[in-house]
Amino acid sequence: MPDYHDDLRLAHVLADTADATTMERFKALDLKVETKPDMTPVSEADKAAEELIRTSLQRARPRDAVLGEEFGSEGHGPRRWVVDPIDGTKNYVRGVPVWATLIALMERGEGGDRPVVGVVSAPALNRRWWAAAGLGAYTGRSLSSATRLSVSRVSRVQDASFAYSSLTGWEERGRLGGFLDLSRDCWRTRGYGDFWSYMMVAEGSVDMCAEPELSLWDMAANAVIVQEAGGTFTGLDGREGPHSGDAAASNGLLHEDLLAYLGG
């Protein structure tokens, strides 16, 4: 098993840099916000944070490729950093503190690219989560002050808490019926949304979550954290990892049930 300690430390440094930039502009009255071609918002803070991360990676890991939400892909090779500078931009621009910078390292192997390092930093919540392949998943404000994460042991849908982002995406994908059935059958549902649902699965405070339409940068960091916490992360098609354009995450014990409701 390769040693990812140095890459994990670098990811924390990158997250520190991003946190300083995003928090400086959070709730700023003169924050500049644009609408992208897909009709989603992007703020000046999104762009600034990604630019800083890219600049740092060019110095520290010049041979690695980079994929970011705002500035696309550059470089080639078996290692690729995947960055979402602000996951939850709609929250960010409205002053809602549920947003985070997502940083992942993906490495090419026999089974294709897989995330091997992930950091999710939510400075407005004063929370950070991270993981690396073979090293486990943790939460805390620093590497030296951390608590190991572990998924729940809930094994019945009737006892399970299910987290989601919104209803409209399920309706657009023709899967609203299965979503509503799951909502009726499980113990509790909450629309936490974005990265937070996956982090709570990793913490064991939520048992399963799913989203119907996502990009790689939305999922890569979340996937390795959930998996290293003992959970399962797949697409709605059951394919392992963050490659399906959608996501289902659970404590593992509930995963077949989750896909039975939402897969197709």
Image (spheres, rainbow, N blue to C red):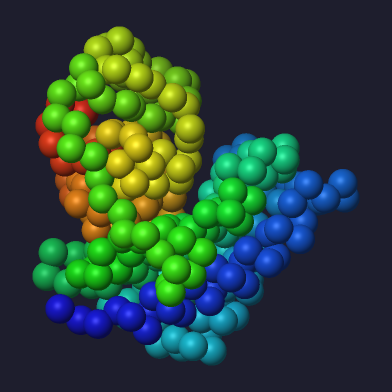
Task: Identify which residue, 85 or 174, lies in the foreground.
Answer: 85
Residue 149: percent from the left, percent from the top? 31, 54
Residue 103: percent from the left, percent from the top? 46, 64
Is 228 placed above or below 11 here? above
Task: Identify which residue, 72 or 44, lies in the foreground.
Answer: 44
Q: Residue at coordinates 30% horizontally, 68% vertically from top-left?
A: 132
Tell me if I can see residue 245 in this picture: no
Direction from residue 222 to residue 109 in the image, left or right: left
Residue 107: percent from the left, percent from the top? 27, 72
Quadrant in the rendering for residue 156: top left
Direction from residue 186 to residue 213 in the image, left or right: right
Residue 261: percent from the left, percent from the top? 21, 21
Q: Residue at coordinates 72% horizontally, 37% vertically from top-left?
A: 94
Task: Identify which residue, 58 or 118, lies in the foreground.
Answer: 118
Q: In the rendered view of the protein, which quadrant contains the N terminus? A: bottom left
Quadrant in the rendering for residue 256: top left
Is 11 placed above or below 225 here? below
Direction from residue 243 to residue 89 in the image, left or right: right
Q: Residue at coordinates 83% horizontally, 50% vertically from top-left?
A: 28
Task: Identify which residue, 147 or 196, lies in the foreground.
Answer: 147
Quadrant in the rendering for residue 21: bottom right
Q: Residue at coordinates 43% horizontally, 72% vertically from top-left?
A: 143
Q: In the rendered view of the protein, which quadrant contains the C terminus? A: top left
Direction from residue 176 to residue 86 in the image, left or right: right
Tell me if I can see residue 131 in this picture: yes
**Number of marks drawn:** 0
Name the residue furthest right: 30
